[in-house]
């Protein structure tokens, strides 16, 4: 569905024309702007009620700009129905219904614009004769003149009758340092003080503490009340530190205060807080704060026997009573936790030293069995997680001629990938002990190509019972393409001296069947079918039923047997073929069948004939990124294509299903229609999005213009 957001519908008339300027913004179903897109916009005008029959309809072909904006003039489009010049403006409320690309967007009531047109339609109405709809404006007036008088008397004109969203102007008076707002208040901004160097970024501030109020304050700034605390019988948490990081002032085991409101604009003087004993001072400032009364209780009230860690080096270790330093003794040593000692000890990465390690060693190398391993990753949820910005995340080298990765499960060795059968070849498959396993080539976890254990290959089947088996729902096709417009051939070769070989060749002008008894050396054309429908049989058609004289026709009886009948008026019947033009088209498919691509019209010649319809093309479905995850019930996003003749579905055949999102896929449909009368008939392709009601998805037919066609055959 397209969403249209109206910018404004302004009722302005050009000279001598009663057109209404109309502008809007177009967005798609995902809310994205439809920028620089060609759209067809429909306008329908109704009078009296929103559900009334439209009295005028027109279409406009417009192109949005880079912001999705389009503009048009109502009354100046391609008229579909009605007469714009004779519309009953002023007879009642006017409503406008808008459609984009055939999709209805909504119906809205037009306000004063149509009545302005009414005032200039030749009836010489005065302003007090022009009716005025006051439902939205809030005025009491019912005519245009009364509305003008009411606005003039009030002295205000508000476009939306909302007093809280008026446009105001902000201004600054440098002489008075006053910042003012129209229809608002005035604020005087402090002028500051004398600055010796005229630099506001390096001012000195003083930190002061009031013991009586427990307030810590900064000159020209704010103040903070420090909690007084209380008696604490725990001697391990008494010492607190105050620190400044950026504009955040933090006290350990306490809160953080943002000093940004009092820091001068442009930076600070990089002053430091200094704690000497219990006295807190600020660098290059005056005053000090004695924090001794807030240092807390000491278990033995003796400040001379505290633990001094400033004399220790290395990593500090404590056991609850003493603190000591762990100092390295050799290059490459690292601290490692020793479970037995319940402490940190020195060790090395290679041999572990005296500490324990997450890695273990054996005769084959080092091992890790306690969790996942991450390389280049901060954490890992997989046994091995490698994160890198290199284009080669893993490099596996071997001095051996063979080099491969083996895959095992609970049942043992199953397969491998790498170099094994040839020094220059790459293998991917099962191992020699796996005599029943298959190799699958998959998409979306579903096997698409299968190589069975006996070497049979299946496409669309996991159980091929011949050398190559192709299976699929609906019409199944195989294709061979010559990229340089050469010939394409399918050969059946039996090697040997007494062989009989056959070959079907498609090339310029038609297709031929050839045979040879020497591996296609000197092959002889047996049968040829030219592009104009002529069948040329080299040895002739032989049948005992062809005996007789005179003009004879070969026909099939009710059981499909060939027989000969004499020439009659009805025996000259032939099959007729019809072909469509390009099928290229794109639409937003809905959850109901919607036509896509151009319609095809053909003429049926015989009453007793039936119609075969074949569609060969490509199709593309784009699912928005926000919807690409399949639903939890196991279903998938898909579209179904259907062929209809004169609006009816086929008597025999099948539809086509497209379930590949954001990728082109082949589209093939074959249908048979019976009991059709002689004359012209219409064929169209329909598409339906198989999802919840109201959903839509972008679908393209013959996306790359590869020559998709509808082929119609009239036959007997």
Image (cartoon, grey):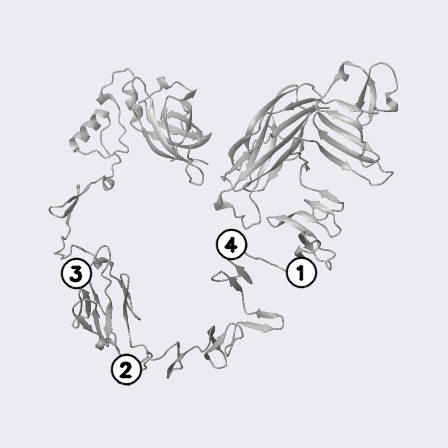
Dot 3 or dot 1, earlier in sequence: 3
In the picture, measured across the screen, residue 188 lies left or right of residue 109, that is left
- Regarding residue 511, the answer to whether it shows in the image is yes
Mark 2 lies on residue: 298
Mark 3 lies on residue: 220
Are the residues tagged 3 and 1 within 8 Å (C-beta)? no
Element marked by disc 3: loop
Q: Which mark is residue 390?
A: 4
How far apart are labels 3 and 1 at the CA level?
78 Å
Dot 2: few (<14), some (14–19), or many (≥20) neighbours within 10 Å?
some
Mark 1 lies on residue: 400
Dot 4 or dot 2, earlier in sequence: 2
Dot 1 or dot 4, earlier in sequence: 4
Dot 2 or dot 3, earlier in sequence: 3
Q: Hey, which quadrant is residue 142 in on the image?
A: top left
Q: Which mark is residue 437?
A: none
How far apart are labels 1 and 4 at the CA level?
26 Å
Q: Position of residue 714 (x, y in %)?
A: 69, 23
């Amino acid at each position: 569905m397209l969403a249209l957001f109206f910018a404004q519908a302004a009722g302005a008339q050009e000279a001598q024309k009663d057109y209404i300027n109309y502008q809007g913004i177009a967005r798609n179903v995902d809310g994205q702007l439809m920028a620089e897109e060609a759209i067809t916009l429909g306008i329908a005008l109704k009078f009296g009620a929103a559900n009334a029959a439209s009295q005028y309809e027109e279409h406009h072909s417009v192109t949005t700009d880079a912001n999705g904006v389009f503009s048009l003039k109502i009354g100046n489009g391609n008229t579909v129905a009605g007469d714009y010049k004779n519309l009953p403006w002023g007879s009642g409320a006017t409503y406008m219904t808008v459609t984009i690309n055939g999709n209805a967007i909504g119906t809205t009531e037009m306000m004063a614009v149509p009545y302005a047109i009414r005032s200039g339609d030749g009836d010489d109405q005065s302003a007090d004769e022009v009716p005025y709809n006051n439902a939205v404006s809030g005025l009491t007036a019912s005519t245009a003149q009364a509305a003008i008088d009411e606005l003039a008397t009030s002295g205000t004109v508000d476009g939306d009758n909302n007093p809280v969203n008026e446009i105001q102007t902000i201004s600054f008076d440098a002489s008075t340092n006053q910042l003012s707002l129209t229809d608002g208040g005035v604020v005087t901004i402090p002028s500051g003080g004398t600055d010796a160097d005229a630099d506001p970024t390096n001012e000195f501030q003083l930190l002061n503490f009031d013991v009586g109020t427990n307030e810590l304050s900064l000159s020209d700034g704010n103040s903070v009340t420090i909690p007084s605390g209380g008696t604490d019988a725990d001697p391990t948490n008494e010492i607190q530190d105050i620190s400044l990081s950026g504009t955040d002032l933090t006290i350990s085991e306490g809160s953080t205060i943002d000093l940004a409101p009092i820091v001068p604009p442009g930076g600070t003087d990089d002053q430091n807080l200094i704690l000497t004993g219990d006295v807190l001072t600020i660098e290059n400032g005056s005053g000090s704060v004695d924090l001794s009364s807030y240092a807390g209780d000491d278990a033995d009230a003796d400040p001379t026997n505290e633990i001094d860690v400033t004399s220790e080096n290395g990593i500090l270790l404590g056991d609850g009573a003493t603190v000591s330093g762990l100092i390295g003794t050799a290059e490459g040593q690292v601290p490692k936790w020793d479970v037995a000692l319940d402490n940190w000890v020195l060790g090395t990465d290679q041999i572990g030293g005296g500490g324990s390690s997450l890695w273990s060693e054996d005769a084959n190398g080092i091992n890790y069995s306690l969790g996942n391993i991450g390389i280049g990753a901060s954490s890992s949820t997989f046994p091995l997680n490698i994160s890198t910005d290199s284009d080669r995340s893993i490099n596996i080298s071997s001095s051996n001629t063979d080099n491969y990765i083996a895959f095992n499960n609970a049942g043992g060795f199953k397969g491998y990938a790498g170099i094994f059968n040839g020094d220059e070849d790459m293998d991917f498959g099962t191992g020699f002990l796996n005599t029943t396993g298959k190799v699958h080539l998959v998409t979306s976890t579903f096997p698409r190509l299968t190589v069975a254990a006996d070497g049979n290959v299946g496409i669309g089947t996991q159980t091929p019972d011949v050398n190559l088996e192709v299976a699929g729902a609906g019409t199944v096709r195989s294709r061979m393409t010559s990229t340089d417009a050469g010939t394409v051939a399918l050969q059946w070769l039996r090697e040997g001296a007494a062989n009989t070989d056959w070959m079907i060749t498609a090339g310029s002008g038609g297709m031929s069947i050839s045979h040879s008894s020497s591996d296609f050396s000197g092959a002889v054309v047996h049968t040829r079918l030219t592009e104009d429908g002529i069948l040329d049989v080299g040895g002739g058609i032989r049948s005992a039923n062809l005996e007789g004289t005179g003009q004879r026709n070969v026909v099939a009886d009710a059981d499909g047997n060939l027989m000969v009948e004499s020439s009659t008026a009805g025996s000259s019947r032939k099959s007729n073929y019809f072909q469509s033009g390009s099928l290229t088209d794109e639409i937003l498919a809905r959850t109901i069948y919607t036509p896509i691509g151009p319609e095809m019209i053909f003429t049926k010649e015989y009453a007793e004939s039936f119609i075969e319809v074949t569609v060969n093309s490509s199709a593309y479905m784009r699912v928005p990124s926000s919807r690409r995850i399949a639903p939890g019930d196991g279903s998938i996003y898909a579209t179904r294509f259907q062929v209809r003749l004169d609006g009816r579905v086929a008597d025999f055949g099948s539809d086509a299903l497209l379930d590949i999102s954001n990728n082109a896929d082949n589209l093939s449909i074959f249908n048979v229609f019976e009991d059709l009368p002689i004359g012209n008939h219409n064929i169209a392709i329909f598409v339906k999005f198989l999802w919840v009601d109201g959903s839509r998805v972008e679908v393209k037919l013959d996306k790359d213009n590869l020559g998709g066609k509808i082929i119609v055959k009239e036959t007997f």
